[in-house]
Image (tube, coloured by chain):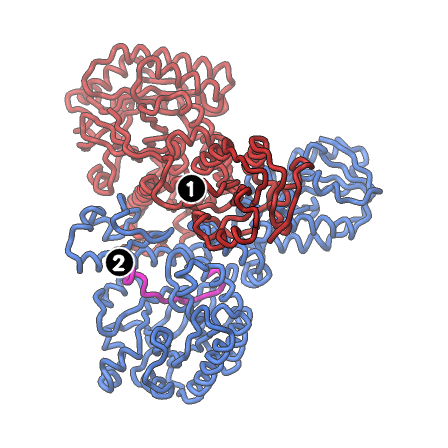
Chain colours: A red, B blue
């Protein structure tokens, strides 16, 4: 059902096979209103979305049995894949709905939606643990029953993960749904995290779920499809994500940008090449009639979301998702806090990160010491054994690998006893680079900013440094005493290692 | 001739009045080949460029006196403003040209270009200082003569700044051209800086020139119009910049993105909404005939450059240019080095930065301590006098200004002698925030990442801390001893100040 073709960090490019064609992931899934939709579904398809989500509960209330006769594809006039939410959102908003889970399951089967969701009880955000637990257990019970009752008709049933900010519950919920046998899961209710800018909690919630899931299962994220969060959500392992924000924002006269959302009245120049932004200036768009204005804004919003997904896809293909996400983090200080979730979970992110990449990786600042590719190199060096007693440590050369540099040739001349010396280059993020393995990825395949780094900010370097000296028996270290970065680490060495300076 | 309507950092939104209409700046000026142009100038106008640059030397060689009869606007079929380079680029490439400066000046007058450039001798990059000096002096001599010979016919003559990486020469060259009387200047030859990714040198060169120029004079930057460098160039004070890269890259099958340049063959998904990227998939574009492919790529490249300029303009309107540029810096490690030029020149950047902004500023990391708005606040606090002898220092509250917080009310209850205590909040970037002035911009108008900051990385905080204690006579400081950030600074206090802990 789900084929993965390319991965980077916990993000992947994949294909989900449905009754209505193949869906390439990561995919943004626009919300279509089954009754009040104003942007035609053909337009949504034309902009580039192969899959939409609509609401089964509203459909049931408005069309009743008629819906089962017509099928959901005719009702919303969309021949691509359709996901239906089951009313869980209404439960979250209004407390409860007047339909039984089994009845809803039958309805979703009847309208032949491609992705069906059991009628869950979302925990939302801020629910006391006891109540959250009860909601999770209820949802699990319903989910088991629904899947047991389902038939093998090509529909994909999605297990709804609940738990909110109670990450243990999120983990438990995920684990159980996998055990029950779901082939796809969805993570609930990040809307409230997002409204309070608690992006970091959102990230932690995703990680809590993903750690309990086999890679073969795609993960949908409910209600989080803003260009701001898409890169992080994908990097942490979400494959699809829906949102009605393109329309909700449009109704408030808000224009989505790659970095946030602005009121139309705040925009002087449209920083966008979509058809809407090419047709109107902000001033002109302000002046058209209300209905058209909302629709035009909604279409622009869809285009900018589409572009964001495409940027993320291209970054995965290029193996640059880390770089892309860290750049994106600079859009909002609260989004920047997600970087900590990335650096703390670098082992989790390593699983999907290729061991070798075609292009040099970019190293900017301290965060990059936690890049999976960088960490993998540290792991190698932490096991490196040298028989030599004398050590030379120098800054890496511009020419890589280091042993090809003319400066390295000069070093050979400089030291008479060169053959009995272990040479290591260093790079703040990559750590020590023994010259013998200065050619393996990414030791010879990176580009680093030439700025002054504060050694205290490099704990990964420090740990490798310690291990390297523990694993080997050096009696002498030669280094440039004017090198402030190195000096900090040399200070921590046992006193019986002789310090010799050279420059 | 030049009207400025809005500024941020050293960047500005302005209008240049020419014989062919008003040009809004910052503006990218596409290069049009007077003979071999394949993208029609109407298309270039349609994409959104009001001004182009073409080459007077090539025009002279190809059209001779005919050119003067027709005028440059008819020759390249463009009714907007036209700038003409004079052959300086050919001098740089081929050593010299077979035309005298006065002859060229007459020609440029004859063809009625809107922006004319004297026939200069570009220094390029890597020229020994002695030779560079000779080139600068030659250019100054020609420039003086040319301006003296010019008539008051609405043409704008641009003084060409030379000097390359010899910043003293750049400064001298600029100063002289201003003295000679030029109303617009152009900075020469960054192409070679860019080709070797020496973005930092480019930035330093721009600053060296700008520091010698009155704000009323617009600055053109030659040959630097990539989305990568546009935000920095504008932030440092460039108003217009030309480049042929849209076409040069297209000829090499290269596709410009907001973060760099890719070979078409490397692209799986077009992360762009322009007409070309909407019409073709990368695979489809690969397969069309060579001539069309190059033109389609060139058109896309123009769209993505246009969008970058619009992003920068919108950032200036919003007062977010610092944020935009620092985010952009994460596109390449060598670009990231430009951040150092920004932080070192924060006083230069302060002149154009509004003292008050409508929106909260975003503070992410250590670099932001050098934001002009932040630095301005430090300057105020460095003069703050308190009559009190006891000091309370605490982390800033979520509620701003601090005195409105319920936590502040609690503090009043906590300390019996509260009225005799000076309360300061703090923020790593903003430094100490005396409660009495916690409401002025940006003390109550910022959003800061809640991450662990390393105190050693905050020299601006340290300096304000020192001055604050020097200016005032505190005998007691109350602070939370578990606050690692504060602890670092408390350590440096004179021993006779009593430390008292509270939490």
> Would you identify the image quadrant in which residue B153 lies?
bottom left
Going 80% across and 33% down the picture, which residue do you hit?
B416
Pinpoint residue B404: horizontal percent, then vertical percent: 65, 39
Marks 1/2: CA–CA distance: 28 Å
- Kindly identify which residue carries mark 2: B252
Residue bounds of the magenta highlight: B234-251
Which residue appears farthest toward the bottom when viewing the image?
B149
Going 23% across and 35% down the picture, which residue do you hit?
A50
Going 29% across and 57% down the picture, which residue do you hit?
B301
- Kindly identify which residue carries mark 1: A442
In the displayed structure image, the side of residue B112 where residue B208 appears, left or right? right
Pinpoint residue A150: horizontal percent, then vertical percent: 24, 13
In the displayed structure image, the side of residue A49 where residue A334 appears, left or right? right
- Relative depth, front residue between B243 and B166: B166
- Relative depth, front residue between B346 and B64: B64
Numbered disc 2: what chain? B
Q: Nearer the viewer, mark 1 or mark 2?
A: 1
- Relative depth, front residue between B402 and A35: B402
Neighbours of disc 1 within 10 Å: few (<14), some (14-19), many (20+): many
Examine the structure image and report whether residue A406 is included in the region drawn in magenta: no
SS state under label 1:
loop
Is residue A196 visible from the viewing direction of this image?
A: no
In the displayed structure image, the side of residue B5 where residue A88 appears, left or right? left
Image: A82 above or below B183: above
Which residue appears farthest toward the right when viewing the image?
B496
Numbered disc 1: what chain? A
How many callouts does the rendering have?
Answer: 2
Pinpoint residue A143: horizontal percent, then vertical percent: 33, 14
């Amino acid at each position: 059902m789900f084929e993965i073709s390319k991965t980077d960090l916990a993000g992947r490019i994949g294909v989900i096979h449905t009754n209505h064609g193949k869906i390439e992931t990561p995919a943004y899934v626009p919300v279509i209103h089954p009754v009040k939709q104003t942007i035609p579904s053909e337009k949504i398809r034309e902009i580039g979305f192969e899959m939409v989500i609509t609401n089964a509960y509203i459909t049931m209330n408005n069309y009743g049995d008629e819906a089962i006769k017509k099928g959901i594809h005719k009702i919303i006039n969309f021949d691509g894949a359709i996901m239906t939410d089951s009313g869980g959102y209404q439960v979250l908003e209004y407390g409860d709905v007047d339909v039984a889970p089994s009845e809803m399951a039958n309805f979703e089967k009847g309208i032949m939606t491609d992705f069906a969701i059991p009628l869950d009880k979302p925990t939302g955000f801020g629910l006391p643990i006891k109540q959250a637990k009860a909601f999770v257990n209820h949802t699990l019970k319903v989910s088991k029953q629904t899947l047991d009752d389902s038939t093998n008709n090509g529909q994909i049933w999605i297990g709804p993960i609940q738990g909110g900010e109670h990450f243990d519950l999120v983990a438990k919920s995920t684990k159980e749904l996998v055990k029950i046998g779901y082939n796809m899961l969805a993570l609930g209710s990040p809307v409230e995290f997002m409204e309070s800018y608690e992006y970091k909690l959102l990230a932690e919630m995703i990680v809590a779920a993903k750690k309990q899931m086999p890679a073969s299962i795609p993960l949908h994220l409910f209600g989080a499809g803003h260009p701001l969060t898409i890169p992080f959500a994908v990097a942490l392992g979400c494959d699809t994500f829906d949102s009605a924000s393109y329309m909700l924002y449009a109704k408030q006269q808000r224009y989505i940008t790659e970095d946030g959302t602005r009121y139309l009245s705040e925009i002087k120049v449209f920083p966008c090449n979509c058809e809407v932004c090419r047709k109107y200036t902000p001033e002109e768009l302000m002046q058209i009639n209300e209905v058209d204005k909302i629709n035009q804004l909604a279409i622009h919003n869809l285009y900018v979301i589409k572009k964001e997904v495409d940027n993320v896809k291209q970054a995965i293909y290029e193996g640059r998702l880390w770089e892309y996400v860290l750049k994106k983090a600079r859009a909002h200080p609260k989004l920047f806090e997600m970087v900590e979730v990335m650096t703390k979970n670098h082992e989790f992110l390593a699983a999907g990160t290729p061991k070798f990449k075609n292009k040099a990786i970019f190293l900017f600042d301290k965060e990059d010491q936690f890049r999976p590719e960088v960490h993998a190199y540290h792991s190698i060096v932490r096991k490196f054994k040298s028989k030599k007693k004398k050590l030379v440590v120098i800054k890496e050369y511009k020419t890589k690998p280091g042993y090809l540099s003319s400066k390295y040739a000069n070093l050979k001349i400089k030291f008479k006893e060169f053959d009995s010396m272990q040479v290591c280059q260093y790079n703040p993020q990559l750590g020590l680079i023994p010259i013998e393995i200065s050619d393996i990825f990414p030791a010879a395949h990176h580009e680093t900013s030439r700025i002054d780094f504060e050694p205290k900010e490099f704990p990964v370097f420090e740990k490798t440094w310690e291990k390297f000296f523990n694993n080997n028996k050096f009696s002498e270290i030669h280094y440039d005493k004017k090198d402030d970065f190195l000096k900090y680490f040399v200070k921590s060495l046992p006193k019986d290692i002789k310090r010799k300076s050279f420059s």
